[in-house]
Image: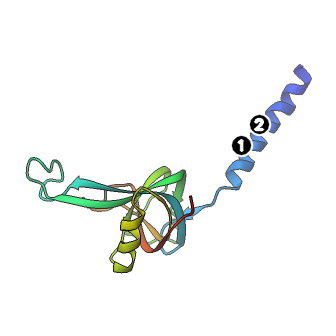
Amino acid sequence: MIRFFPLLIFQLFSSLAFGRANQPKYFYEPSISIIEGTLLERVFPGPPNYENVKKGDKAEGAWLLSLTRPITVFYDEKEGDPVSFNETETGVRIVQLATGETKNFKILKASLGRKISCTGTLFHRFTGHHHTRVLMYLDSCRPLEE
């Protein structure tokens, strides 16, 4: 048994490393990313204090994507903007969707509570209107077959 222990340890670490190697890598803008998950809509407190809607803060609705599996979003300092707010984030489970495109609103409204695929560029939060660590400028989205 003892002589097989090193082989067992090697197999364990090999399988862990292999599993990580097969996971997609995500980077901040300008890289295009595709993420999948369940679409949620939530209300957060907005201005003036970003603390409590019942105490007078404006209610802000947000589209959130609860990811199928957690991701890591990498910030490449060599490629990045020196005044960027981006930083590497691990274990990202929820991404806020930022969309100004009216074409996406119909799809989002029809997909609430369902699994969808979103394509766009990722960025790090930098204002009080950003309610998750990582957000996506949404280019397009589509429902997934369930």
Question: In which quadrant will I find the C terminus?
Answer: bottom right
Q: Quadrant of residue 9?
A: top right
Residue at the (54%, 54%) spot, across then down: 71
Q: Quadrant of residue 101?
A: bottom left
Q: Are marks 1 and 2 in contact (CB under 8 Å)?
A: yes
Q: Position of residue 13 (x, y in %)?
A: 75, 39
Q: Determine whether, in the image, residue 117 is placed left or right of residue 110.
A: right
Residue 16: image tag:
1
Mark 2 residue element: helix
Residue at the (49%, 54%) spot, across then down: 67
Question: In which quadrant will I find the N terminus?
Answer: top right
Residue 92: image tag:
none
Q: Determine whether, in the image, residue 124 is placed left or right of residue 23.
A: left
Query: Label 2 belongs to which residue?
Result: 12
Q: Nearer the viewer, residue 97 or 22?
A: 97
Q: CA distance from mark 1 to mark 2?
A: 6 Å
Q: Residue furthest left?
A: 56
Mark 1 residue element: helix
Residue at the (33%, 79%) spot, across then down: 102
